[in-house]
Amino acid sequence: MQIAPFEIEQYFDRYEFTTPHLLCASDCETVSLAELLEMAGMSMSDFGRLRLGYTEAQGNPELRTAVSHLYKSVQPNQVVILAAPEEGIYLTMRALLDPDDHVIVLTPAYNSLRTIAQHITGNVSQWEIQPTENGWQIDLNAFERLVKPETKLIIVNFPHNPTGFLPTLNQLQAVVDIAQRHDIWLFCDEMYRGLELYGADTLPSATDLYHRAIVLAGLSKVHGLPGLRAGWLIIQEPELRAQLINWKHYTSICPPAPSEFLAMAALKAQEQLILRSRRLIEQNLQAAASFFERLSQLFEWRPPQAGSVALVGLNLPSATDYCHKLAESAGVLLLPSSYLGYGDQHVRMGYGRADFTANLAVFEEYLLAATT
Ligand SMILES: Cc1ncc(COP(=O)(O)O)c(C=O)c1O
């Protein structure tokens, strides 16, 4: 049976490496292998000694221990190291869902968070984030109204791609309370956790609030290392963990040894990497704010509270047509919200790259040329 097109990735596949001025990437600026090792106090010869045999299916014990320390109450045996963060979404849906289950997904969402559940159960309700005068907001009553007797799972992503929404601690606790009250699993995609902006606190991980939370995290976005393909799941329930590892034998069997080695390095250098990403985003957001002030006729700007992306309203008939034309005629890449399953009146922007302000200047020049 065919699965829905992975529209975001198909779009990036078409444009990412041929369009010079990316303004919608969700990953922060990366570093070289040599820079990463230096930050971690490790050498190329340490890396050179790595043996390239099979690795442990659940992940290297030393790496699982380092990951467990990122949480309050997680044990190394509750960590599953993945071949890529994306794999964690697929494996969880496969291990958890049956065709007669109902699933609720916070939307708009990174495609696979919705489409894999849709593929397996055909029974997915969307809990939509709302645009308000004061930024994006969630309606907890609306979430609870979607719950049915056969609801098995709620899927959320905090900090949120694409809006940049971050719940308050009370809101996160309320999501957990609703899930707990109805005995529902909670899949919390925390790929952008750690990128809280302007001094905001990092929220507790869902795994530290609820034993039936499954948490996805990794090094692609916050640490700027998407080429490492390093990610993990935290699963407290042993039975689900075992089922998921069984599915993993059908996808990747075990994590790549070089990624595990370099993930250890990244966790050693984590403070430096995260600070670097956060500073870059805050600088870029200043440039973005004045850009949107100058161009307020065309854009509706809601600054993100966390993460590396934000969803910007576009005052044109079709964001999709506009983005294709922009990529082809100006070499500037924005992501239309249609590819996130969210109408055609918004674009996603990404603020974590070092060339953001230069690319924004190219975009502004193009806009000015178009109006003169
Ligand atoms: C919310 C979210 N979850 C998961 C992923 C997958 O991460 P990766 O591409 O590192 O596998 C992404 C990537 O864009 C994402 O935005």
Image (cartoon, grey):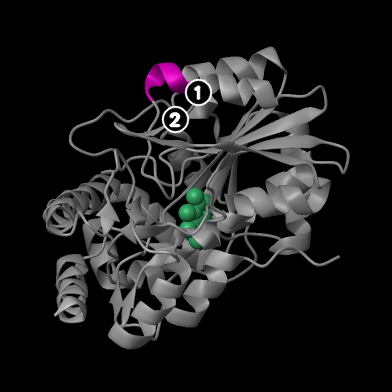
Residue hosting label 1: 208
* Residue situated in front as seen by the camera: 285 or 56: 285
Image quarter (top left, top right, bottom left or bottom right) of the N terminus: bottom right
Residue 218 lies, with reference to residue 141, above or below; the image says below
| Total marks in image | 2
Classed neighbour count for the residue bearing mark 2: other residues with Cα under 10 Å, few (<14), some (14–19), many (≥20): some
Residue 161 x, y percent position in the rendering = 44, 48
- Camera sees residue 264: yes
Q: Reading the chain from its start, which is encountered first: label 1 or label 2?
A: 2
* Image quadrant where residue 15 sits: bottom left
Residue 249 lies, with reference to residue 325, above or below; the image says above
* Residue situated in front as seen by the camera: 158 or 267: 158
* Image quadrant where residue 294 sits: bottom left
Identify the residue at horizontal 31%, vertical 41% (top origin).
306
Magenta segment includes 127 = no
Q: Is residue 144 left or right of residue 41?
A: right
Q: Secondary structure at mark 1?
A: helix
Residue segment shown in magenta: 168-172
The answer to whether mark 2 is within 8 Å of ligand 1 is no
Q: What's the residue type where badge 2 is placed?
A: Tyr
* Residue situated in front as seen by the camera: 107 or 121: 107
Q: Secondary structure at mark 2?
A: loop
Q: Which mark is residue 71?
A: 2
Q: Main secondary structure of the magenta part?
A: helix
Q: Is residue 41 left or right of residue 229?
A: left
The answer to the question of whether label 1 and label 2 lie on touching residues, with beta carbons closer than 8 A, is yes
Identify the residue at horizontal 37%, vertical 23% (top origin).
168
Identify the residue at horizontal 50%, vertical 25% (top origin).
139
